[in-house]
Image (cartoon, grey):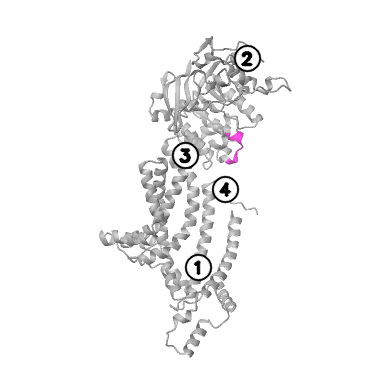
Amino acid sequence: MTTLKVENLSTHFPTPSGVAKAVDGVSFSVRRGEILGLVGESGSGKSITGFSILGLVDPPGRVVGGRILFHGEDLLQRSPEEMRAIRGRKIAMIFQDPMMTLNPVLSIETQMVETVLAHEKVGRAEARRRAVEALGLVGIPSPDERLSAYPHQFSGGMRQRVAIAIALLHRPDLIIADEPTTALDVTIQSQILSEIQKLSQSLGMSLIWISHDLGVVAGLAHRVAVMYAGKIVESGPVDAVLDHPVHPYTVGLLRSIPANLERGQPLQAIPGMAPSPVDRPSGCPFRLRCFAATAACHAEPAETMDGEHAWRCFHPQSEVAA
Amino acid sequence: MTVFVIRRLLQSIGVLFATSIIVFLGVYAIGNPVDILIAADATQAERQAAIVALGLDRSLPEQYWIFLTNALQGDFGRSFVFSQPAISLIFARLPATLELAFVALVIALVIGIPLGLIAGLKPRSVTDETIMTGSILGFSLPNFWQGMMLIMIFSVWLGWLPASGRGVVGEVLGVRTSLATWDGIAHLILPALNLALFQLALVIRLTRTGVRETMPLDFVKFARAKGLSERRIVLVHVLKNIMIPVVTVVGMEFGSLIAFAVVTETIFAWPGIGKLLIDSIMVLDRPVVVSYLLVVVTMFIVLNLVVDILYSVLDPRIRLRDAQ
């Protein structure tokens, strides 16, 4: 059962210095109840991919090509009103910074009840009851009392729980989580992670977990897709990709995690910086920073598949060098 | 909250006391009213009698002391010109000015906020450019000139509205107001519009800036991701956030509305305190000027307090702290 299938998605932003190809021909799919980790550096296009699915790309940016099949139907063909009805009900999103996602001047009750009423014709009392239930679900103590509080009366971790509760109100088929634990303390982070894991299992929801933290993705996701410069360079089951990375970029990412190395050894950072989205090198976008690059890399690498494990590289690494 | 209000009121007394000294000294420095009040051909004896009758023969500290002790008993002196208590002169004219300023404020908000929203939601569109150019005119054209143009267009050329006076004043719930009769409203429109134009331009700009700053914030995007309608996002999520700066500035500016009313009242012959003040300054009618300024200072203090209280209603993060 495929919940979401993204085919060849491209989202471009016109800028004074040229067209920024934030997302440049991305394809992946998410099955029912599956957690997909979408990994990459800042600016690799992973968040824009999430916003493209919801139809929330800020103008002047827009989706210029591809298909986003949600239960087999292309979301790009939907009218704005149809998309509004899908957002928050069928597909929900959780943002990175919980300090910024809740409106500071509206009570939690207002912000939750309006979400219920935006999609269903129920009474206020019923909407409120569901809000209390959702807050209880994400582990907020005495939810009935806390409902009337304002965002500034909650800590960062609690606010993120509220945001998750809002996302859960309509039991969506898919939640897109855009680095939801990055801004939190490590202890709070692991609590939230285990809550999300439990909830997605018990409610049968699919999850796209956008992150730059391979450690989090390794422990949470079933499958992982590694993005670089607007493209997915490697994807597959989480064990295959993280234990036997094929693309030099994935190899580099794994090598730059301190825990993977012996103590005292210098960290092996990937040299250079991600290319500017308006001025990317021809062929493989990673070739200028790649240790394995050759003249062949001036051509665009095609996708190679090994079972579910897929990559785009002329010089696949058979084993992790480290 | 209660402690906050009480402490604020105690501070206000200090402010009023300080103001009374400054105002008294200032008015004393402007000139000697006797030169204006007494006929040029009066004898020295008549002149001396007038000086004694007005209490002007005493030293400055003495005059201030007498003023202060009387003021504490509610007596702000008698007008040299009208021979009536100055404070009752002012209170007789104050409602007309407050009415004018209030209607101007309502016009500024009711027209300004929607225009600012429209401009801010479609930045750099033709509508936005038109509204913003219009607001520049509201800012930069002199108030008195705007007033005369309004009279020329609507009273002289079109003949739709009367050019001066307050019209027939009716009574609503014991308050005498022009708003009670159609004639009164017709008389009120032009001066209120004249007084509102500057505030209107200000409200448009504040609202537009607020919208431009708030729309890209995460909570707006999150509201969209929740599936809320654009209408609810703008009218609830965005508007409630931008009302905070709007209320701050407009609350403070309500004082300037009363101050600016001096110009508007003069142009439209509106019988408010602004006109009374100008007339009193011309003839150095000290008690009226002093009382007027004290009344205005009191109004500013009250407005400040109201704005502070409105804050805590609009922004839950601000609670009026009782401590300290």
Q: Earlier in the sequence, mark 1 or mark 3?
A: 3
Residue at mark 3 to residue at mark 2: CA–CA distance: 43 Å
Most distant residue in the left direction: B158
Q: Position of residue B69 (x, y in %)?
A: 58, 75
**In this figure, which residue is indicated by the disc labeled 1?**
B293
Residue at mark 3 to residue at mark 4: CA–CA distance: 22 Å
Residue at mark 2 to residue at mark 4: CA–CA distance: 52 Å
Q: Earlier in the sequence, mark 3 or mark 4?
A: 3
Q: Name the element at disc 2.
A: helix
Q: Residue at x 52, y 60 (%)?
A: B302
Image: magenta residue range? A152-159
Residue at mark 1 to residue at mark 4: CA–CA distance: 32 Å
Give the residue type at disc 1. Answer: Leu
Q: Are marks 2 and 4 on the same chain?
A: no
What label does residue A243 carry, if any?
2
**In this figure, which residue is indicated by the disc labeled 4?**
B318
Give the residue type at disc 4. Answer: Ile
Q: Residue at x 45, y 43 (%)?
A: B211
Overall secondary structure of the magenta stretch? helix
**In this figure, which residue is indicated by the disc labeled 3?**
B215
Q: Chain of mark 3?
A: B
Q: Are marks 1 and 3 on the same chain?
A: yes
From the image, state whether disc 2 or disc 1 is nearer to you: 2
* Side of B191 relative to A230 (left or right): left
Q: Is residue B109 visible in the rendered structure shown here?
A: yes
Query: Is residue A234 located in the magenta-colored stretch of the structure?
Result: no
Nearer to the camera, B46 or A175: B46
Q: Name the element at disc 3.
A: loop
Nearer to the camera, A6 or B7: A6
